[in-house]
Image (cartoon, rainbow, N blue to C red):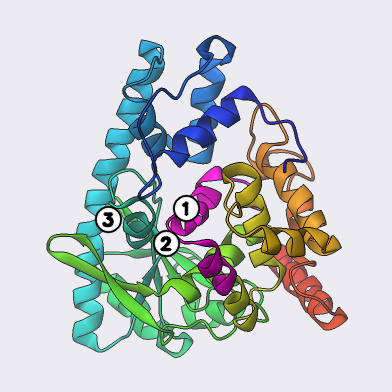
Amino acid sequence: MSLVALTPEFRLLADACRRSFAGADSAGPLLQDEGSIDWSRFLRTARFHRVQGLVWRALRRQRVPPPIAEALKTDAEAIAIANLRAAAGSRELLAAFDDAGVALLFVKGLTLGVLAYGGVASKSAADIDILVAEDDVARAAELLRRCGYGLVVPQADEDVSAWHRQAKESLWANENAGLHVDLHSRLADNRALIPTLTVNSPSCCVEVSPAIALPTLTDDELFAYLAVHGASSLWFRLKWLTDFAALLHPKDGAEIERLYRRSQMLGAGHAAGQGLLLADAIYGTLTDCPSLRDELSRDPGHRWLLEQALKQLAGKPEPVEPTSARLGTLRIHLAQFALLPGLRFKIGELIRQARAALS
C-alpha cells in the first residue's frame, strides 16, 4: 500500500536499509536498473534521512558509481567512529549515575542499534538519549556537568527543573568529547501519550560492546515509545521508520499484533497503528498479520495519518527540512491532534503547541 509515488532513489534507499535488518537476507544483487538512479540525489536523500551507514552496508558490493561509493563509505566510517565515541561516553554516564544512585535508561541510540541491526556500527545516532525520573532532573543535571557537559537548550542560566516541567527533554553538549546528550524526564511531548513509560518501566541490559552493557526499555515499552517518537515528527526521516521496522523484522505476525495491543494499553494511541501501516507500506511489516493490517486500514484516523506521514516522508523528489519552508511543519503539527481520540486531548495538545511556540 502506498499513497504517494516513491522515486527510484527512495525505493533503492529503502531496499538497501532492509538488507541491514537483523536476520534479513542480504545476498544477491540489489540494483536491477542502476541507470534509472540519479546518484547525486540518492546520496543527498541518504544523508537527509541519516541512513548512510545502513545503505553502505548493503551497497558496498553493488554497482555504485565510485564517487558515490566513496562518499557513502566515508559517511559510514564517520558514523561507526561516532558510535564508538558514544559507547565510551555512555559507559562514563552509566558509571556516574550508578555511583550517585540516580536511575537512568538509555533509549534509541546504541541499544536500539544492537536490537534492530545486530550491532552498533551502522545506525546513525546523533545524540545519547537518557531517561531519568522528573524528580531527579536537578541531580542528573549536576552529574552531566561533572562529566563535562554544558547546557545548550534551554540556556545555561535557566532552571533546568522548571524547563522540564513544560518540556520533555533538555540538550547538553560535551565539546571536548564531541558528544551530545538529550536528557529526558518523559518520553512524549504530550503527557497523555504513553504516560506510564518512565525510568521505572520494565527494562533489560543490551551489550553494545564486549565491556559495555546499557539498560533500556524492553520490547513492549520500546515498541510503544518508538511509535510515539516517530509520530511526533510525522516520521519525516526514514531513519526512524527503518529502526521501527527493523526491530519488528524478526517477529512473527502474532507477536507484532500482541505488541500493538499492548501499545494501546500503554497509551500509544493512533501512533502505533500509523507506524505499523507506514512500515508496511515501505517494508511490508504486516505481511504476516493481514487481519491487523485490515483492521488498521479500516480506521479513517489511521488512513489519514498514514497519508500524511507518506507525504511528509517521501512526497517530494528532493527531501527538505520541514523547518526550512514556510508552513513546512504545519502537517506535522496538525497530525499530533489525531494521535489520541477525544476533545480533551485535542484541547491539551493545542495548549501544548501554543506554549511551545511561545517559549
Q: CA distance from mark 3 to mark 2?
A: 12 Å
Location of mark 1 (residue) = 243
State the image coordinates of residue 56 (x, y, percent, origin top left).
36, 30
Comparing labels 1 and 3, the label whose residue is closer to the camera: 1
Taking the image as drawn, is residue 177 in sight? no
Residue plotted at (22% across, 82% down): 98
**Quarter residue 297 falls in:** bottom right
Is the residue 221 above or below the residue 23 in the image? below
| Contact? badges 2 and 1 (CB < 8 Å) | yes
Comparing labels 2 and 1, the label whose residue is closer to the camera: 1
Instruction: Point out the residue furthest to the top here.
Output: 35
Q: Amino acid at mark 1?
A: Asp
| Contact? badges 3 and 2 (CB < 8 Å) | no
Location of mark 3 (residue) = 86
**Quarter residue 289 falls in:** bottom right
Q: Secondary structure at mark 3?
A: helix
Residue plotted at (29% across, 37% down): 78
